[in-house]
Image (spheres, grey):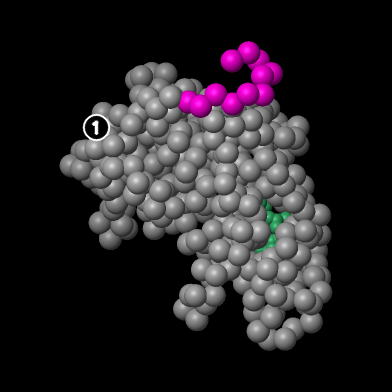
Amino acid sequence: MSPGSSVAMPSDVIFPLEGKRVWVAGHRGMVGSAIVRRLASEGCEILTAGRDVLDLERQSAVEAWIAANKPDAIFMAAAKVGGILANDTYPADFLYNNLVIETNIVDAAWRSGVGKVLFLGSSCIYPKFAPQPITEDSLLTGPLEPTNEWYAIAKIAGIKLAQAYRKQHGCDFISAMPTNLYGIGDNFDLNSSHVMPALIRKAHEAKLAGADSITIWGTGTPRREFLNADDCADACVFLMKTYSDFEHVNVGSGEDITIRGLAQMVCEIVGFTGEIVTDTSKPDGTLRKLMSAEKLKMMGWSPRKTLPAGIAETYKYFTERYLSY
Ligand code: GFB
């Protein structure tokens, strides 16, 4: 396709999953469980290994498990994740745990000759002041956002691992960079969660308590781009089947919203009519990180779920389990 063309070209399937053994590392997490749900229609054999069976932080255990179970493909959805406060509070965990999980899986996958690996990163890999919408080639062009630079460094290392094993060993390892994700299986703990599940919980509890207001962190002015975890899983499966190249691929919705705007939308869906007040002792983080969704769109993929529909579904999931939180 000529540069600048806006016509999407449906990509050919170069790595069909039918009949393959596919390991979803991190299958109990929000993204991993969404990938497992999505793979159900691919005719593949889905492999999983819970923490009780496999400690991803132990290199020899990962090597032995991969050698014994012989996956043809791996989705690397296992990671230490959390919201802005958790990232800022536990830099060592976010750097070390993510680095060690990535290096263990990538190296063991190469040693066992795994046919394809998809590494999942995050939009926080990009510089704090990257031009918006952020294209893939903005990587490593400027300083990172301080609240999550530790996690970002680990995720950048993951991209580089996939590239290095492709370059040196000819491995078909690729990387996808999703934007802020939310959905079924999210973490609703107010100290460690991302903003979406936190707002859903705060609005719900305020409604039940008949409260006058909910408090959101920071100024409410930062903008964030949100993608439902099921759409992200669909994009991951799409990339696994159709993409084989050095550069990572952004996975986003192409649209962002202010945190206050999101809070208003969540309150409306939850049915909380009180005020939204700000706690500016909490960090804003980066002011904007809208990714360009062009590359993936040109390959023929776009998200399906609208933000209000995704929030309503996530709220339903939350209320069905609320008493167990
Ligand atoms: O989702 P979030 O925690 O992470 O916060 P980041 C997004 C924005 O929402 C920030 C604001 O400006 C927060 O201050 N916010 C408002 C809240 N109220 C709340 C609340 O009750 N809880 C939370 N958590 N935020 C993370 C990174 O950044 O995004 C990770 O730290 C990762 O590394 C992830 O990249 C996708 O979008 O700021």
Which residue is at the far bottom? 209
Residue 236 in sight: yes
The image shows residue 86 at horizontal and vertical percentages of 59, 59
Task: Name the residue: 67% across, 24% down.
Answer: 6
Name the residue located 57 percent from the left edge and 39 percent from the top edge. 302
Q: Residue furthest top?
A: 2
Q: Position of residue 35 (x, y in %)?
A: 41, 48
Asked whether the viewer can see residue 62, the reply is no
Question: Does 315 sit above or below residue 182?
Answer: below
Give the magenta part as a residue range: 1-11
Magenta: main secondary structure = loop
**Which quadrant of the structure image shows residue 177?**
top right
Residue 14 magenta: no
Q: Is residue 97 above or below residue 118?
A: below
Circle 1 residues within 10 Å: few <14, some 14–19, many ≥20: some
The amino acid sitting under disc 1 is: Ser
Q: Quadrant of residue 124?
A: top right
Q: Quadrant of ligand 1?
A: bottom right
Q: Mark 1 sits on what residue?
A: 112
Residue at the location (51% across, 68% down)?
317
Q: Left or right of 81: which side holds 287?
A: right
How far from the left and from the top, in percent, is residue 311? 62, 61
- Name the residue at 44% across, 56% down: 29
For label 1, being within 8 Å of ligand 1 is answered: no
Q: Is residue 277 left or right of residue 229?
A: right
**Viewer-side residue, 98 vs 306:** 306
The total number of labels drawn is 1
**Vertical side of 14 occupied by 319: above or below:** below
